[in-house]
Amino acid sequence: MDYQDERTAYGRLMYSLEMGWVRFLSGHIWLWYVLNLTWGLPGTIIGACIALFVRVFLCRRKPARYRMVREFDFGSNWGGLEGVFFIFVSRGMGDAWEEHTREHELGHSFQNALLGPFNVFLTFIPSMLRYWAQRLFPKRFGKPYDLIWFEGSATDGGHYYASR
């Protein structure tokens, strides 16, 4: 569903900027690697630390390859998390839901390449807060998940790249 008309002017601008960025980077994936290992290094380091913790303590299976990232699967009924070169997805939610979550989390890695060190504050923390607010207080924060620009562009950007 297209929420662009319901977003603020800032949200429309950021969504459009990120979708253009995904289209460009999809054709120059080498640049995705370079940016995530330089400009986006803070997010990459956080993701690597999370991946190490998850691999040692939570995930007994070897992570699988999903496009250009490694996917860890563990737990159930909690959603997903992006760690730039690593994505974390819960299981038991159905194949379509898991694929949607993989694509969405992959989309967040494109945001890291674009926003670099600012990504932690512009998308990573707000995305986690939004997820938990909607999960814990669905009546108060029950708006569509992709309505906010950083979630909508992650979903649409990840789907765009994965379906190429």
Image: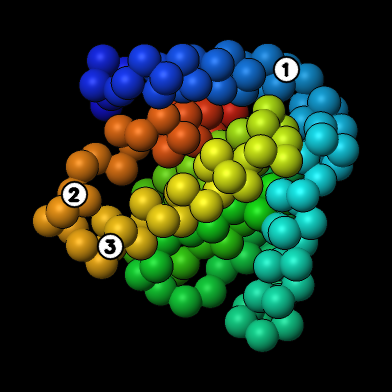
Q: Which residue is mark 1?
A: 27
Q: Kindly report the distance in space between the C-alpha atoms of the residues bearing marks 2 and 3.
A: 9 Å
Residue shown at 18% from the left, 58% from the top: 138
Image: 39 above or below 135: above
The front one of 161 and 133 is 133
- Element class at badge 3: helix
- Res. 136 image quadrant: bottom left
Q: Earlier in the sequence, mark 2 or mark 3?
A: 3
Viewer-proximal residue among 69 and 145: 145
Q: Secondary structure at mark 1?
A: helix
Which quadrant does the N terminus fall into?
A: top left
The answer to whether 97 is drawn above or below residue 38 in the figure is below
Residue appearing at x 37%, y 51% in the figure: 130
Q: Viewed as shown, does residue 154 lie left or right of 149?
A: right
Is 164 situated left or right of 137 in this image? right
The amino acid beneath tag 1 is Gly
Looking at the rendered structure, the kind of residue marked 2 is Gly
Q: Which residue is mark 2?
A: 142
x and y, in percent, of residue 63 in the image: 69, 66
Q: CA distance from mark 2 to mark 1?
A: 36 Å
Of labels 2 and 1, the one closer to you: 2
Closest to the observer, 155 or 129: 129
Q: Nearer the viewer, residue 94 or 48?
A: 48
Q: Residues within 10 Å of mark 1 (few under 14, many from 20)?
A: few
| Residue named by callout 3 | 135
Q: Position of residue 157 (x, y in %)?
A: 52, 28
Identify which amino acid the numbered label 3 is placed on. Arg
What's the residue at 39%, 67% (across, down)? 78
Q: Is residue 54 left or right of residue 150?
A: right
How much space separates mark 3 and mark 1, taking CA atoms? 36 Å
